[in-house]
Amino acid sequence: MKVAEIMSSDVQVITPQQPIQEAARLMVDTDTGVLPVGDGERLIGMVTDRDIAVRAVAEGRGPDTPVSEVMSGNPLFAWDDQDVEDVAIQMSDAQVRRMPVLSRDGERLVGIISLGDISRTDGDAAEAALSGVSEPGGEHNQTQGG
């Protein structure tokens, strides 16, 4: 099964210049804890509710702080034509619950895949993803290579 078959394609994107207060409001409105950060159709980062709390609020930054100051750059991503099992392993290894999905033809953001999406598939993909993501400790970020 391919990622495009199970991903959510209705994804809200925030720009790096928008304030974190707008990011938080968009997260509330869409009932999510993560937003892709885009520059046009190009994915440049991810921002989470935890980024806003830990990198902004805990450091005394205000609501007008640009998203670019708290986001994780160089995000992990999946290709829309990639096998779900491969993505599940990638999510497990990185201990992330959601990944943006890019089109292989043009490398533009086309969706987001979550553990919930994977859990509704048949096979071992859900088990592989959940086992790694739920392990304590380790690196918890959306950045490639780290």
Image (spheres, helix red, strand yellow):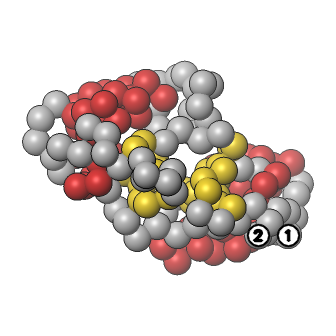
In this picture, is 134 found above or below 19?
above
Residue 70 shown left or right of residue 105 in the figure = right
Residue 87 shown left or right of residue 144 in the figure = left
Three-letter amino acid code at the position of disc 1:
Asp
> Residue visible at 31% across and 31% down?
86
> Residue visible at 82% across and 52% down?
69
Quarter containing the C terminus: top right
In the rendering, which numbered label is found on residue 100? none
Residue neighbourhood size for the residue with mark 2, other residues' Cα within 10 Å, grouped as few (<14), some (14–19), many (≥20): some
User: Number of labelled discs?
Assistant: 2
> Residue visible at 52% across and 77% down?
29
Quick check: marks 2 and 1 in contact, CB under 8 Å? no
Q: Which of marks 2 and 1 is in front?
A: 2
- Residue 54: x and y in percent read 73, 46
Residue indicated by mark 2: 18
Could you tell me if residue 11 is visible in this image? yes
- Residue 75: x and y in percent read 59, 41
Residue 16, quarter of the rendered image? bottom right
Residue indicated by mark 1: 64
Label 1 sits on a secondary structure element that is loop
Quarter containing the N terminus: top left
Report how far apart the C-alphas of labels 2 and 1 lie in the structure: 8 Å
- Residue 144: x and y in percent read 59, 31
In the image as oriented, which residue stretches furthest toward the bottom? Answer: 29
Three-letter amino acid code at the position of disc 2:
Gln
In the image as oriented, which residue stretches furthest toward the front? Answer: 105
Could you tell me if residue 130 is visible in this image? no
- Residue 42: x and y in percent read 61, 56
Label 2 sits on a secondary structure element that is loop
> Residue visible at 34% across and 62% down?
8
Q: Which of 59 and 26 is in front in this view?
A: 26
Q: Nearer the viewer, residue 91 or 32?
A: 91
